[in-house]
Amino acid sequence: MKSKVYFINNITELDKLLNQIDLTRYIKSDDYVAGKIHFGEEGNKAYLKPQNIKPIFSAIEKVAPHTFLTDCNTIYKGSRSDSVNHLKTAKKHGYDFAPLIIADGLFGHNVIKVTVDLKHFKEVSLGACIVEADAIVCFTHFKGHDVTGFGGALKNMGMGNGSRAGKQLMHADIKPQVIAKSCTGCGICVKWCPTSAITMDKKIARIDLAKCIGCAECIAACRFAAIGISWAGTPNSVQEKIAEYAAGAIKDKKGKIIYFNFLLEISPNCDCYAHNDPPIVPDIGILFSDDPVAIDQASLDLVNQKAGKDIFKELYPNVDGTVQLQYAQKIGLGQRQYELITG
Ligand code: SF4
Ligand code: SF4
């Protein structure tokens, strides 16, 4: 049987969508429910806006009063690399209506390791609060991503729930390379690198790969497209690793996780970046499912339908973003076949 994915094309129909979902099927009144979200890096304007999730959060809170919003800290220097600044950023972005917890603690050391026994990882290192929560509601801003083609629920559950150490392991295959002729010598990448791997040499950035942890933040920070990715393995392995981290977050919560994908302000790149480019297609709507693979597949199909082409492949020709869907299906996280239920 195909997985069901519910779709509304306008935020004004959110009540209609919520009426179609029996939240009590997934969440019990005494559950501690983690609303997994990405609060958006300071400077980014495309992040998921609080007004879009507030009605859903309220509906969940009515069923389970112990509901909170959460994310893990980032590995790069920025506005979300420790809990204090992360919480300040969340509040600045309007997330002041819910209890907020940073899942992996002040500096990212509050982790729980979960055994997954998969191809890349035997165990994954996740933010403790995600593992401790009884149920998860995954709120995802669907958008493009230079490392994974696109970022959806699987990326939010995998990379997003990884501790800082876990994020490092997932990124290990990324090797940034400076394109000297494009480098203006502005030095922005030097400020963002968490390991001081970048120095300026005759006004051109130089990266010491021995110090680099592959966080890709310099690629994001550079406004002149002067840093490209040279993969240590293939672009596929990072997507497989993300799916394995998602498997760890999902483990032991069978029937206790639901997903909302927001196809709004669909930017070409991640909300981790301190800037954003204009949307690649007009707003499409909001999706709901209890299958992370089906909801991402449906989101991808809807964006491509709207664009009239494989827009993510056009943006990132060297990355096949469907690898994450194929691999997630293979390891049992869900299925790519779905039934889209509208209206
Ligand atoms: S941010 Fe880009 S342009 Fe500026 S120094 Fe770094 S690589 Fe060069
Ligand atoms: S040089 Fe490496 S560690 Fe530094 S920002 Fe770039 S990818 Fe991250």
Image (cartoon, rainbow, N blue to C red):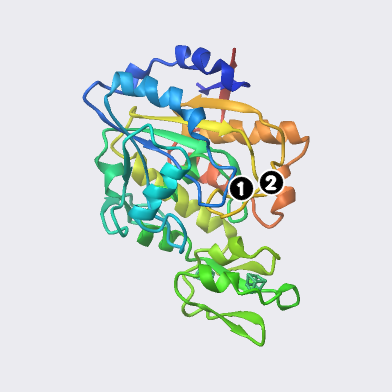
Residue picked out by circle 1: 321
At x 47%, y 29%, the residue is: 53
Can you tell which quarter of the image residue 249 is in? top left
Residue picked out by circle 2: 312
Q: Residue 171: percent from the left, percent from the top?
A: 48, 62
Q: Amino acid at mark 2?
A: Phe
Instruction: Indicate which disc, 1 or 2, sits on the residue closer to the N terminus.
Output: 2
Q: Is residue 14 left or right of residue 248?
A: right
- Element under label 1? loop
At x 32%, y 19%, the residue is: 62
Q: Residue 262: percent from the left, percent from the top?
A: 55, 32
Q: What is the residue that sits farthest to the front in this orientation?
A: 92
10 to 195, vertically: above or below: above
Q: Nearer the viewer, mark 1 or mark 2?
A: 2
Neighbor class of circle 1 (other Cα within 10 Å; few <14, some 14-19, many 20+) is many
Q: Is residue 243 left or right of residue 47?
A: left
Q: Residue 325: percent from the left, percent from the top?
A: 54, 42
Whether label 1 touches label 2, CB < 8 Å: yes
61 to 280, vertically: above or below: above
| Ligand 1: image quarter | bottom right
Can you tell which quarter of the image residue 29 is in? top left
Q: Amino acid at mark 1?
A: Gly
Q: Quadrant of the C terminus?
A: top right
At x 54%, y 26%, the residue is: 287
- Element under label 2? helix
